[in-house]
Amino acid sequence: MITNNDEWKNNVINFLNNHKNSENHDFIVGYCCHILSDIHNNTTLWIPFKQKYADEIEIYAAEIEKQKDNILNIWYAGKERQDLTSNEVVTVEIIMNFIKNAVDFVALTLQEHLN
């Protein structure tokens, strides 16, 4: 788990500033958007989730890995997309808010440092 999110954000900003005149500038900005989205995910979803469920995550780490493998490789193989509206831990509303807030975070960061 990354805990030095401000340092990561500063590294992305420095990387952008160091490559302003690159012929691959559009690719670099896109890649930095991806990293900034990951940072936002880490600070707003992943860290709070791990803190809230710390005991459960540590006790059931092996079971979680088995479940993840099962979900990725067996449950949904060849199946249609499922209805997620009844999810309780990660709701559709949480995901939609994350998308909006992540876009705002990335756009503001880029706007502040690309001008």
Image: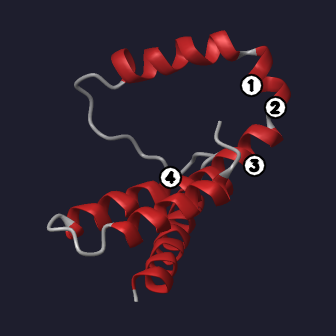
Residue at x 54%, y 11% (from the top left corner): 66
Q: Which residue is mark 3?
A: 48
Kind of residue at badge 3: Pro
Q: Quadrant of the N terminus?
A: top right
Kind of residue at badge 4: Asp
Q: Quadrant of the C terminus?
A: bottom left
Kind of residue at badge 2: Ala
Q: Residues within 10 Å of mark 4 (few under 14, many from 20)?
A: some
- Is residue 13 placed above or below 45 in the rendered structure? below
* Disc 1 to disc 4, C-alpha distance: 21 Å
Query: Considering depth in this image, is 58 or 31 the residue closer to the camera?
Result: 31
Colour scheme of the picture: secondary structure
Residue at x 31%, y 67% (from the top left corner): 19
Do the CB atoms of the residues marked 2 and 3 lie less than 8 Å apart?
no
* Secondary structure of the residue carrying numbered label 3: helix
* Disc 1 to disc 3, C-alpha distance: 13 Å
* Disc 2 to disc 3, C-alpha distance: 10 Å
> Which one is closest to the eye, mark 4 or mark 2?
4
* Disc 4 to disc 2, C-alpha distance: 21 Å
Q: Residues within 10 Å of mark 2 (few under 14, many from 20)?
A: few
**Reading the chain from its start, which is encountered first: label 1 or label 4?**
4
Judged from this view, the residue extending furthest toward the left is 23
Q: Which residue is mark 2?
A: 54
Q: Residues within 10 Å of mark 1 (few under 14, many from 20)?
A: some
* Secondary structure of the residue carrying numbered label 2: helix
